[in-house]
Every structure is written in C-alpha cells, then in structure tokens.
Amino acid sequence: MYQYKEVKDGVYVLSLDNHVEIASALKAFCEEKHILAGNILGLGAISEATFRFLNPATKAYVDKTFQEQMEITNLTGNISEKDGAPYLHLHITASRKDYTCIGGHLLTARINGACELLVEAFPGASIGRYPDAETGLNLYKF
C-alpha cells in the first residue's frame, strides 16, 4: 500500500503504491504510526477522485466524482482525532489535460502513476474533533 522513510523524528516521506486510494492509505499509515495530530503535503497523479462541497446554507454535502487522468498540483491537509481514530481533513487541487484545475475537499482519489507525500506528525499530541451544529462541520476540540 505504501513505503516510507522517517527523515526526522515524526517527519515521514511516503510513496503510495500505484492504484491505491489515497485517503485509505494515509489513514492506515496514521493508524500504524499512532498519529493523532499532524500535517500532510503531497503531489502525484490520479485517474479518479471524489470531491466534497458543503453548502453552508443547507449544511448539506454535495459530492462529485471525476474520472480522468489528472496531476495533483497540491494535496494538503491535517490529521486530528475523532472517536479514538485518526481523522483526515484533506484538500486537493488537480490539473486536467487542458491545464485547467479543479479542487476541493478530497473524499477519495485513486492513484494512477505516483503519489509522494510528506507527513509531519506532532509526537505525543492529540487534537480532537466535535460535530458543530451551527456549521455542520467537525471542528477542532481543544
């Protein structure tokens, strides 16, 4: 699913295997390393992705799947904890073959080529989440 190297205490460089789903692989890595707080950065190539958009007026999510080859120009996110498990909040920008970009909150993405990630864990830290009724979001709980 992935290979990694710890380059500094709590800082990992990951290479995800081709055709792996990004969010699942990242969650598995965080579970393996017991990471409950941190940052994620990445780039790569995907052939399918599902983005999520929250309509603040209705608090309803709208998901849209794109099935085409795209370059990840930026994947960024954070790691926190919800219900005792790693909780990933990921955003992505991806470029299409016509050089236009699409992006948003990332639910899933299937690698087609490579995916290189940097995970910076905050060792010993845990940042919780709670469902906020006003916004409809899972917000940080300090």
Image: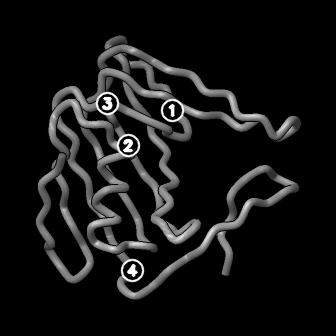
Mark sitting on residue 103: 1
| Alpha carbon distance from label 4 to label 3 | 27 Å
Residue, x 32% and y 23% (percent of image)?
70
Mark 2: few/some/many CA within 10 Å (<14, 14-19, 20+) = some
Circle nearer the viewer, 3 or 1? 3
Circle nearer the viewer, 4 or 1? 4
Amino acid type, label 1: Gly
Element at label 4? loop
* Residue bearing mark 3: 110
Marks 1,2: beta carbons within 8 A: yes
**Of callouts 2 and 3, which one flags the residue occurring earlier in the amino acid sequence?**
2
| Alpha carbon distance from label 3 to label 1 | 15 Å
Element at label 3? strand
In the rendered image, the quadrant that contains the C terminus is bottom right
Q: In the rendered view, does 128 fall on the left or right side of 87?
A: right
* Residue bearing mark 2: 74
Amino acid type, label 4: Phe
Mark sitting on residue 122: 4
**Of callouts 2 and 4, which one flags the residue occurring earlier in the amino acid sequence?**
2
| Alpha carbon distance from label 2 to label 3 | 15 Å
Circle nearer the viewer, 2 or 3? 3
Marks 2,3: beta carbons within 8 A: no
